[in-house]
Image (spheres, rainbow, N blue to C red):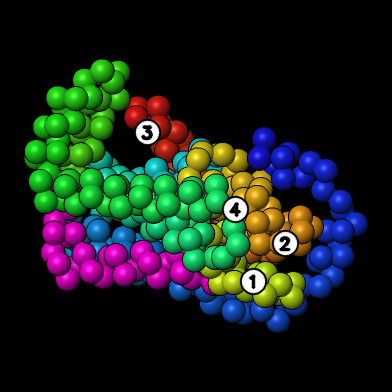
Amino acid sequence: MCLAAALWGLDLEEVSQSFSKLNLSTLPVMLIFIFLFFWLKAVRWRLLLAPLRKFRTREVVPPLMIGFMGNNILPAHLGELIRVFVLSRKFALSKTAVLSSVILERVLDMLVILLFVGVGLLVVEDLPPWIQTGALTMAAMAISFSILLIAYVFRTQAFIQAYRQFFRFLPTKTFQKLDEIMESAAQGLASIKNGRAAFWIILNSLLQWTLMGGMVYVSLASLGLWLHPMASIVTTGVSALGAAIPSTPGYFGVIQLSFWVTLQMFGVDRADAFASSIYYHLNQYIPVTLVGLYYLNRLGLGLNQITNNAAEEKEKG
């Protein structure tokens, strides 16, 4: 549906003209950014997994890249369950405990994304009042969710008891699964309770999404579009929010639609927004998919094997 919306009414001749302006000399910069982004992701996952086992960064890279490769070629974010399966299988860890670290990752990402979008829209001048109101709302949501996360970290059992008391209206299977995840996540939260580790985890999360913003900025600059840096940050945030919703494999359509919806606020025409989104998107999709397939083969795993396991876990959850 998102892909259809992104393509609906698009003038292909104008898109062709936009692509003709593309400066491919920026390609090495894009590849460096995507390498650093996933290296930071691996480092952060290692820190979050520390209470379960002391990993080296290079040990978590294969499951991480296989998981993101899975997101690129499979629907409904199955890649997240795939990397849980690969890591837990290789190192004999509890799947629920590993899954809790992935969920915590997503919570941290969402907080940073909401903060970036909110602050980015507030900084950019001459935007309509309704957009500024939305920006304030997102910033407030980021702060509110941060408070909830802090409460969960430092008052874990009280938080879980409150959940058990106030959320019994949920279906029994869902209620029990969430309860199991929160109990298991309590072990992983030990990494955040360590002040030094918490600092590096938060800094890492901020740097990751700054790099993504940099990729958007370079993709626009490759077409000769030199926008306010915050326009790139906001576009990154909106794209990430869209990608957080289970959709088509590889987020095709989601990224393009997010670029169009966001960049029109900054005076970018639809054809240029589409062309920059394709350049940005393929610089992630192709290397991540290839690296993930390489590690899949290196570990002697089959795509059908990991897909079926992920689907089974999704059915259980």
The reply to whether callout 1 and callout 4 are in contact (CB within 8 Å) is: no
Q: Which residue is more in the foreground, 32 or 218? A: 218
Reading the chain from its start, which is encountered first: label 1 or label 4? Answer: 4
Residue that mark 2 sits on: 268
Q: Amino acid at mark 3?
A: Glu
Tell me if residue 294 can be seen: no
Residue that mark 1 sits on: 227
Q: Amino acid at mark 2?
A: Val
Residue at the (59%, 44%) spot, across then down: 249
Kindly report the distance in space between the C-alpha atoms of the residues bearing marks 1 and 3.
Answer: 44 Å
Kindly report the distance in space between the C-alpha atoms of the residues bearing marks 1 and 4.
Answer: 18 Å
- Image location of residue 124, percent across then percent down: 54, 65
Kindly report the distance in space between the C-alpha atoms of the residues bearing marks 4 and 2.
Answer: 16 Å
Which corner quadrant holds the N terminus? top right
277 horizontally vs 48: left or right: right
Q: Nearer the viewer, mark 1 or mark 4?
A: 4
Q: Amino acid at mark 1?
A: Leu
- Sort mark 2 into few (<14), some (14-19) or many (20+) by Cα contacts within 10 Å: some
The reply to whether callout 1 and callout 2 are in contact (CB within 8 Å) is: yes
Reading the chain from its start, which is encountered first: label 4 or label 3? Answer: 4
Region rendered in magenta: 186-214
Residue that mark 4 sits on: 128
Q: Does 140 sit above or below residue 46?
A: above
Reading the chain from its start, which is encountered first: label 1 or label 2? Answer: 1
Reading the chain from its start, which is encountered first: label 2 or label 3? Answer: 2
* Element on which disc 2 rests: loop
The verdict on residue 298 being magenta is: no
Kindly report the distance in space between the C-alpha atoms of the residues bearing marks 4 and 3.
Answer: 45 Å
Residue that mark 3 sits on: 313
Tell me if residue 169 can be seen: yes
Residue at the (59%, 79%) spot, across then down: 29
Kindly report the distance in space between the C-alpha atoms of the residues bearing marks 2 and 3.
Answer: 43 Å
